[in-house]
Amino acid sequence: MNKTLPLAKRRLLAVALTSLGALTALSACTPLLVGGAAVTSAIVVSDRRTSGAQLEDQAIELKAGNRIKDEVGSRARALVTSYNRRVLLTGEVANERDKALIGEIASRVENVAAVQNELEITSSPSLRERAADTVVTGRVKAAFIDANQVPSSAFKVTTERGTVYLMGRVTQRESDYATQVARNTQGVRRVVRVLEIISDEELARMAPAATPAPAPAQ
């Protein structure tokens, strides 16, 4: 029996799950958002990171988020997203000094390989703006599912003020195609790639080995 969901249902599921995550985030009272904290127990089998790397990324997000909150407090709304030890910082800060401080705090967290600081010096977005970003994220994920050449599970998508950030371990071809798909999605202002480019050979090595057929009964 084929249990694969129809395309329309898979697209709807992508948007619904994204919206559910947003409702959880928007209901929180803390000014600091920690990426991934609400789903620390979720390990996606199709993720191109090892299970150890996924757990490490979750630990990085929690440690960085807690340290930023301790040192910066309510002066910033920072979202920490880690993918294969590469940290993306998005959100808003009051001044350049706090932006640099948050970047330094994140870089000092154990096992962090690199930090891309995309914090903006501006006021925090309204609930409506944040909800709009969530809708854009859902649209991009649905567009990836719709496009057969984009492995949606290989990308982590984050949206801030209409800017879509793509993270993941992908080939150059996958990166270029996904970027084009995201740019053509309604509501996307620009696309920023925070990607780890791998070769086709490395991608092939990630593929699970075929399970041999069982021997016929004697």
Image (cartoon, rainbow, N blue to C red):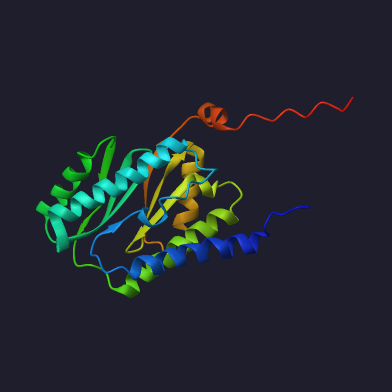
Picture coordinates of residue 151, whole percent (x, y): 55, 46
Please tell me which residue lies in front, 196 or 13: 13
Q: Quadrant of residue 59?
A: top left
Picture coordinates of residue 185, whole percent (x, y): 48, 61
In the rendered image, the residue lying farthest to the front is: 218
Picture coordinates of residue 82, whole percent (x, y): 34, 45
Residue at 49% across, 48% down: 178
Is residue 75 visible in the rendered image? The answer is yes
Image quarter (top left, top right, bottom left or bottom right) of the C terminus: top right
Is residue 83 visible in the rendered image? The answer is no
- Compared with residue 152, is residue 201 higher up or lower down, i.e. above or below? above
- Compared with residue 52, is residue 165 higher up or lower down, i.e. above or below? below
Count of numbered labels shown in the rendering: 0
- Residue 131 horizontal side relative to residue 13, left or right: left
In the rendered image, the residue lying farthest to the right is: 218
Residue at 23% across, 54% down: 119
Residue at 55% across, 27% down: 205
- Residue 131 horizontal side relative to residue 75, left or right: right
Please tell me which residue lies in front, 218 or 152: 218
Q: Quadrant of residue 210?
A: top right
Residue at 18% across, 49% down: 102
Picture coordinates of residue 48, whole percent (x, y): 49, 38
- Residue 149 horizontal side relative to residue 77, left or right: right
Q: Quadrant of residue 169?
A: top left
